[in-house]
Image (tube, grey):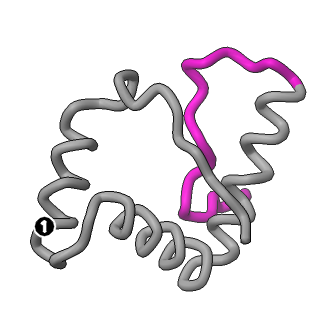
Amino acid sequence: MARLTIRNLENLDDEVKEGLRVQAASNSRSMEAEARALLTLVVKEAPLEAEALALWWRRRRKAEVDLARSPPSRTRRRTK
């Protein structure tokens, strides 16, 4: 069975941590169980978006791009 450890939670935005806590409580789950459910939802329900985000992260790390750059948009850009 695979393990996933999320480090440096102190660097995570307080609103995100609180939102996860509240969402977990509303679903009668622990924060860990809620995080698993959210990861499952993202990967299974939106596989193309998850794949695009993973590709973006790989390219970003490889090129060591400026941290201010934002992730790819979910909407397609129209070409002229």
Residue 17 is drawn in which quadrant? top left
Is residue 30 found left or right of 41 in the rendered image?
left
The region drawn magenta spans: 63-80
Q: Which residue is mark 1?
A: 25
The quarter of the rendered structure image containing the C terminus is: bottom right
Instruction: Name the dominant secondary structure of the magenta segment.
Output: loop
| Residue toward you, 9 or 50 | 9
Q: Quadrant of the N terminus?
A: bottom right
Residue positioned 60% across, 26% down in the render: 69
In the rendered structure, which amino acid carries the disc numbered 1? Ala
Please tell me in which quadrant of the rendered image residue 53 appears: bottom right
Image vertical order of residue 40 relative to residue 12, above or below: below
| Left or right placement of residue 32 versus residue 44 in this view | left
Quick one: 40 or 29, which is closer to the camera?
29
List x then y, in percent, for residue 39: 51, 67
Image location of residue 57, percent across then percent down = 73, 41
**In the rendered image, which quarter is residue 50 located in?**
bottom right
